[in-house]
Amino acid sequence: MDVKEAIQKRRAYRSLDPVKITEELVRDLAESAQLTPSCFNNQPWRFVFVYDPEVLKQMHEALSQGNEWIHYASMIVVVFTKKELDCDVKGREYYLFDTGMATAHMILRATELGLVAHPIAGFHEDKVKEILRIPEEMTVITLVNIGERREELRSVLSEKQREWERERPERLPLEKFVYINAYQEE
Ligand SMILES: Cc1cc2nc3c(=O)[nH]c(=O)nc-3n(C[C@H](O)[C@H](O)[C@H](O)COP(=O)(O)O)c2cc1C
């Protein structure tokens, strides 16, 4: 699969089937993040790969309402960082940007491997930190939920989520976010 195809194939599917999680898979995904560019090569990203069934069960308690579909994920990659780990260029802080890029690389690699890798923001950060013993000063920015796409839609999905499963949510047209040579106010 080339990069363009991975970008096009990636979807935030919610109807998931289990996949076998191996140490090789964890390493492969971690290596995809490792090569990401970062400010001064600071590499501010940190990940906890959760696939122990008991810990996954605890993590389900930390999900926001509407994210029950994650009960069928086989692994949750917990992504965290803190601003002291990366550049602050005259007030421009790069830790979330660099961590986001690393996460995107991981998501695209997972896509290439035929997996669903769905990032979410709907979780209770304090609970996640407590379960995984992540220090207070860290920001848990997303949970990336890994599984395989299940064609048949699970009953846990809402009507809206079913619609998104069938069709990719609409994107802004290029004219709304692309400018050539100079920005133009609408
Ligand atoms: C930062 C972030 C937070 C998200 N939070 C949630 C979430 O809490 N629950 C959920 O079901 N999907 C969540 N999503 C998935 C988006 O809804 C999805 O990516 C978007 O609707 C576009 O769909 P597509 O990725 O399939 O193209 C999140 C995605 C991102 C990047």
Image: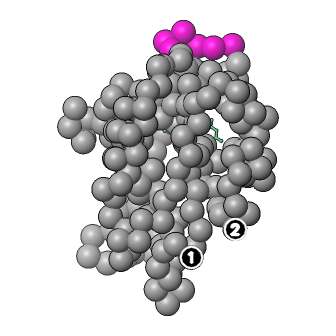
- Give how far across and how far down residue 12 sits, in percent: 51, 34
Q: What residue do we see at 47% from left, 19% from top?
A: 20
Q: Which image quadrant for residue 57?
A: top right
Q: Which of disc 2 and disc 1 is earlier in sequence? A: 1
Q: Is residue 172 above or below residue 72?
A: below
Q: Is residue 146 left or right of residue 124?
A: left
Q: Name the disc covering residue 137, or none.
A: 2
Q: Which residue is mark 1?
A: 84
Label 1 C-beta lies within 8 Å of the nearest ligand 1 atom: no
Q: Is residue 21 magenta?
A: no
Display coloring: one colour
Whether residue 43 is visible to the viewer of this picture, yes or no, is: yes
- Give how far across and how far down residue 52 sits, in percent: 62, 29
How far apart, in angstroms, are the residues tagged by discs 1 and 2? 10 Å
Q: What residue do we see at 48% from left, 19% from top?
A: 19
Whether residue 9 is visible to the viewer of this picture, yes or no, is: no
Magenta segment's dominant SS is loop
Q: Which image quadrant for residue 177?
A: bottom left
Which image quarter is the N terminus in?
A: top left
Q: Amino acid at mark 1?
A: Glu
In front of the other: 95 or 151: 95
- The reply to whether discs 1 and 2 touch (Cβ–Cβ < 8 Å) is yes
Q: What residue do we see at 43% from left, 27% from top?
A: 22
Residue projecting furthest to the top:
152
Q: Which residues are magenta?
A: 150-155
- Give how far across and how far down residue 138 sits, in percent: 65, 63
Q: Is residue 125 above or below residue 117?
A: below
Tell me the element at label 2. Answer: loop
Q: What residue do we see at 73% from left, 63% from top?
A: 136
Q: Name the disc covering residue 41, or none.
A: none
- Give how far across and how far down residue 90 sits, in percent: 49, 90
